[in-house]
Image: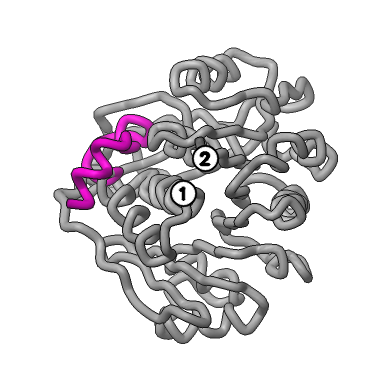
Amino acid sequence: MTHITVIGSFAVGMTIRTPIIPVFGQTLLGSDFDLGPGGKGSNQAVGIARLGAEASIVACIGEDDLAAVATRLYAAEGVDPTHLHRMPEKATGVGFIILNTAGDNFIILDMGANMLMDPALVDRAQDRIARSAVVMSVLEIPVQAARRAMELGRTAGARTILNPAPATALPEGILDHVDYLTPNESELRLLLGLRPDDPAGTRDLAVELRRRGVGTVVVTMGEKGALILDDQHDLVVPAPKVDVVDTTGAGDSFNAAFAVALGEGRPLAEAVRWGVAAGAHACTKLGVIPAMPRRAELMEMLT
């Protein structure tokens, strides 16, 4: 079985739907409140397990009531929690997600215990990393921990994926250890020091990012699919058309399926096709975990 290790984040997501996105000082009546597990690293680990790979999570949670949401999730979904660390110094991470009727969202995070992840904790997971086909990380943890994850993954001979979300300044040298960088279009711009809505062309910006040391850039573009840019590829993989209910978690679903396909030895363009299909599936249901496809559902999307 393909083994994939995710060094990332766990947070409890609290979602509510409103007719419009509120402004400061405005009170709105909402609906469809949901409380459930989230965090990009955790979401991706669950997505990986649902697609039939062996998933391990390296993450930090608090010693509070919300921590049980994580332990119940991994037991139910078959994610290896050996390196799930309980940290008494901070609370379990939380995210507040506001959805409008079109399914667009904004998210406010307090990452709490996730901010205690450090290179030493990553080092403690070397046994899992050493037998992984793919090692992944995100930026909801301190960037030095994500860097160490990429370094250890590369040393172990695994393929390394950095999902730079939320986008932040990257330290010198981290991209040297990243095989696949998977920003969305706004994250791509932020990584280059631009506004998230900068009008520059996405492909042009991906070219610039490659000049900074990334082997392969895969830019997720929502309903437009995903752009692949490296020495052998310069193409857009289109996304299936779906009725959008909730875009939250689409990027995590993409990265999970992309990693599983790579771990199984599938060609890059096919792996991205898996990713865009999984991302599209995630848009069809409310909530993140309920919308993560299982293997049979993904195969149906791909036919």
Q: Nearer the viewer, residue 19 or 166?
A: 166
Question: Quick check: 95 left or right of 242?
Answer: right
Q: Residues within 10 Å of mark 1 (few under 14, many from 20)?
A: some
Q: Of marks 1 and 2, which one's residue comes earlier in the chain? A: 2
Q: Which residue is mark 1?
A: 264
Label drawn at residue 291: none
Q: Please state which amino acid type lies under the numbered disc 1.
A: Glu
Q: Secondary structure at mark 2?
A: loop
Instruction: Write down the quadrant of residue 294 in the picture.
Output: top left
Please, is residue 251 above or below residue 272 in the view?
above
- Residue at 51 percent across and 16 percent down: it is 75
Residue 84 showing in the rendered view: yes
| Magenta residues, start to end | 282-303
User: Is 220 within the magenta?
Assistant: no
Please, is residue 192 above or below residue 144 in the view?
below
- Looking at the image, do the residues carrying marks 1 and 2 touch, with CB atoms under 8 Å apart? yes
- Residue at 46 percent across and 86 percent down: it is 204
Question: Quick check: 273 left or right of 144?
Answer: left
- Residue at 75 percent across and 35 percent down: it is 127
Q: Residues within 10 Å of mark 2 (few under 14, many from 20)?
A: some
Q: Which residue is mark 2?
A: 2
